[in-house]
Image: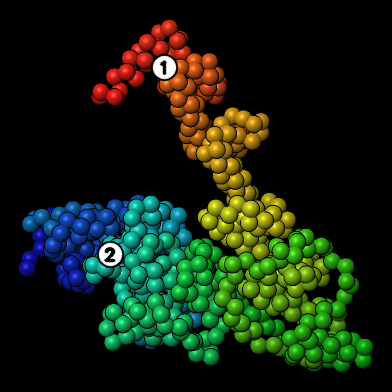
Amino acid sequence: MKITIPGYKIEHLIAEGGTASVYLAVQESLQRHVAIKLLRKFENPEQLSRFLNEGQIIASLNHRNVINIHDIGATSDGRPYICMEYLEGGDLDARIPKKVDPQDALQWLEALGNCLDFVHRKGIIHRDIKPGNILFHKDGTPILTDFGTAKQQESDARLTMDGRAFGSPYYISPEQAASKELDRRTDIYSLGIVLYEMLTGNKPYKGDSHIETIVAHMSDPLPVLPHELLRYRTLIHKMIAKSPDDRFTSAAEMVRFVQQLRMPVKKKPRRMTWAPAGALAAVLGVGGAVLTGLWMIPGRNEHPATPVMTKSEAVIPESTPVTVEMPSPEPVDPVKETPVAASNNEQVIEALLSQAAAALEEYRLTTPENNNAYHYYQRILELHPQHEEAIRGKNRIADAYADLAERKLDQYDYEAARRHLHRGLAIQPDNRRLQALQKKSNIGKLLSQADTALKERRLTRPKNNNAYYYYQKILELYPGHRQALEGITGIADAYGDLAESKLDKFNYVAAKEYLNRGLEIQPDNARLQELQKNTNAFRDAPGRIWKKIKAPFS
């Protein structure tokens, strides 16, 4: 069947799906190759809507790892098409059979994670992450495409059991398979399945039918990794946990974990030299600690205080990664170190870095005492005040607390969020993300207090414990805050309701009092102004009495 699209010369078919085909074409005006996705047929308006929705979503995104869209139109016989950039590097599906080098896999994962974080912040869930939807520029940059099943988060994010809307059964999340409401964590799950396949060359869940595969995602245990890939186990388990609550809370949190995992293990050439017995003993002491895994760090006991927490606050947060130990980097034999003070310090720093990394992974951020990431990085900075890796480590601790706080804010747990923020700011007071989240947590708590006061009719009294007081505090922090302004209107409306109830009982003194209170906070409220005219008993009472008389006969 010949396809005619004005301004384009169709060359050949690239790929074909259930309802759409992708063609390589030349855009004649610019003489460049493009990919044209053509909707071949549609059986109901929903399919057409989903196709056009894809074009609109892609057009709303501008990210280096999201495919570019050039045009949306229709063929000469009325079939809609989307014209996109043509990527010469093929898709991930073609690269997986050869197995992907772990470093390449982590590099692509980091790029795609940043891309997903951008997409999620735009309020969009992709819902169909799979190797076939990950393409490559000829320079090797991974590109996310095919937003045909994507949804805006504020819209109905449920997935029908209609196969046309269903994500690929090999990469579908348990909640997506169960047709539950979806959030950004469903994309993290699918990307985790893709990572497993990149590293092993196999799909972790594969039944004899699509239904069996889908059931396996929901009920089968987490897959086992080969021994040589064990260091990636925590990452994968945190991405493909059955419950969304056990996964990374955001793509940004996942990216930070990947960045830490990608950090190279520093190995320096060693040479044997003779030294006095005392110095050699010190080195052997460190070596023994390396071999046993029990670090007895020499040096003075004084060190900067860890941020103080109560015993209850020291509990590892519920967002702690799945407790699976990652294999430590291969320990080097400290006996071969040059036994001089500088070399000894380097060994101690390497040991501390290893301990800090393990503590950070297990979310032992500032607790328990003397066995947490902050403690180890502080000890490194005592030995080497400008140590870049230790400084970056402290930054990651602050970011981890920001992630935990953000999760608690999403759950409206403002007290827990503020505890995490307090700890993070104790480490990095000028962290802008923590500062912004602290402002958000303060506003969140005030909104909650205001809403409760409004429901309990504590409108403007008692002093400093009423809805108006809390909304005003929000406006001090965030002038023009929409919910606070709407809340004040709600208070005025509540006073209007109270006034009307008093007018119905001919209690004009009480009605006038309520109206005055409402007009104090919102003088231009039209409803209150109109009701104020009714507080004249001689003018209002006869009509109100007549209405009561007529009511039974209405």
**Residue 305 coordinates in the image, percent (x, y):** 81, 62
Where residue 297 appears, as percent x and y from the top left, is 82, 78
Q: Is residue 196 in view from this perspective?
A: yes
Image quadrant in which you'd find residue 140? bottom left
Q: Is residue 23 visible?
A: no
Image point (82%, 63%), residue name: 304
Decide: marks 1, 2 in contact (CB < 8 A)? no
The residue at the point 60 percent across, 52 percent down is: 414
Circle 2 is placed at which residue position? 160
Q: Residue at x 66, y 88 (%)?
A: 330
The residue nearer to you, when weighing 195 against 13, is 195
Amino acid type assigned to the residue bearing label 1 in the image: Glu
Earlier in the chain: of badge 1 and badge 2, it is 2
Front-lying residue, 387 or 50: 50
The residue singled out by tag 1 in the image is 530
Element under disc 2: loop
Determine crowd level at label 1: few under 14, some 14-19, many 20+ residues with C-alpha closer than 10 A. few
- Relative to residue 274, is residue 321 drawn left or right? left
Amino acid type, residue under disc 2 in the picture: Thr
Tell whether 76 sits left or right of 21. Answer: left
Q: Residues under labels 1 and 2: Cα distance?
A: 50 Å
Q: In the visual, does 98 lie left or right of 514?
A: left
Left or right, residue 88 beside residue 240 = left
Q: Residues within 10 Å of mark 2 (few under 14, many from 20)?
A: some
Which quadrant would residue 87 be assigned to in this image? Answer: bottom left
